[in-house]
Amino acid sequence: MRYLGINKSIGMLCLSGLLFFSSCHSVYQLASIQSNSVEINSEYDTKQDNAAVAVFAPYKAKVDSIMSPVIGTCEVDMTSGRPESLLSNLVADVLREYANTLPGQKTDLAVINFGGLRSNLPKGDITFGTIYEILPFENSLCLVSLKGTDLISLFSDIAKVGGQGVSNVKLLISAPSNAELIDATVGGEKIDKDKIYTVATIDYLAEGNDGLGSFLKAEKRVCPEGAVLRHIVLDYVKKKTVKSEVITSSLDGRIQIKK
C-alpha cells in the first residue's frame, strides 16, 4: 500500500504539471514548414551497428524472401512527374482497367496523384519490393460518380496543380504560373455537363485530399473491399508475365500545357 500511495502521488503531480503547462498560452507561432524526402539506401550500410544487424538478421531474411522474387520485366525506365509521365500513365491505366473488370462496372476514367508514387520503376527486373517502394501506402480503389459539371471542376483542380495521373482523359491546361483548365475530353469526347461519369481513383483522393476537393461533390462513392492499389498493380504485372509480356508505358499527350 505504501508503494501504491507513492506512485499515486507522483502520478497526480505529473498530471498537475501537465495541466499547468497546457493552460499557458505559448508566445511562439509556426512561421513555416519545410520537408524533403531522404532515400534510405546502401549508402548507410558503411556504418552498420553489428549488434543491431545480428538482432534483425532473421527478420531481414524473411522480408528478403518475400520482396526479392522477380515477378516481371519493365521495358523502359519509368519516372513520375507533371504534367504526365510514364509511371503515372501506367498506374492510372492499370487502375481503370481493373475497375472495368468488376461485375456490372463501366469506368469512364481514372485519376491518381503523383504524391502516391514514391519511387521510380527502373528498366529490367520487377520484384515485389519494387512495387512496394512505388506504392507503400494502403490506398484502395474507390469508384466515384460525378456529374459532368463537377467533373469539369475536378479537371480544374488538376490543372491548378499542374497535372495528376489520369487515364482515358485529355486535358489542355495553361502554363503553371497561371494554371487553368482550357479544354478537356473523356474517351475522345467533349464532356456532357448533365451526364454522370464514373471515376476510378483511390480512397485518399475520393476524400478530397491533395487539392482535389471536387471529389467531395460525388453523386455516389463505392469503395470495393480489399481492392488495394498496390495489389492491383502486382496482379497486373504477374498476369503480363504469364503471357510473356513486358511492362511498358508511353507518353500520349493526355495532359498538355499550352505554350
Image (cartoon, grey):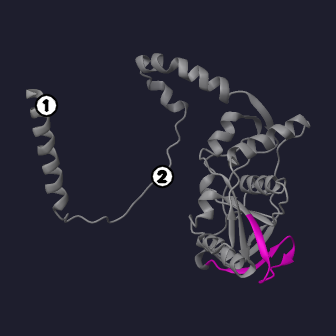
Residue 259 seen in the figure = no
Q: Quadrant of residue 214?
A: bottom right
The quarter in which the C terminus is drawn is bottom right
Callout in the foreground (1, 2): 1
State the residue in front, 241 or 33: 241
* Residue 205, horizontal then vertical, whole percent: 61, 62
Residue 248 seen in the figure = yes
The residue at 71%/43% (across/down) is 231
Residue 259 shown left or right of residue 105 in the figure: left
Residue 7 shown left or right of residue 152 in the figure: left
Q: Residue at label 1?
A: 4
State the residue in front, 98 or 66: 98
Query: How crowded is the residue under tag 2: few (<14 C-alpha within 10 Å), some, or many (20+)?
Result: few
In the image, which residues are magenta? 179-199
State the residue in front, 215 or 34: 215
The residue at 60%/80% (across/down) is 178
Query: How crowded is the residue under tag 1: few (<14 C-alpha within 10 Å), some, or many (20+)?
Result: few
- Which disc, if any, is residue 36? 2
The residue at 66%/72% (across/down) is 218
Q: Is residue 1 above or below residue 191?
A: above
The residue at 43%/21% (across/down) is 52
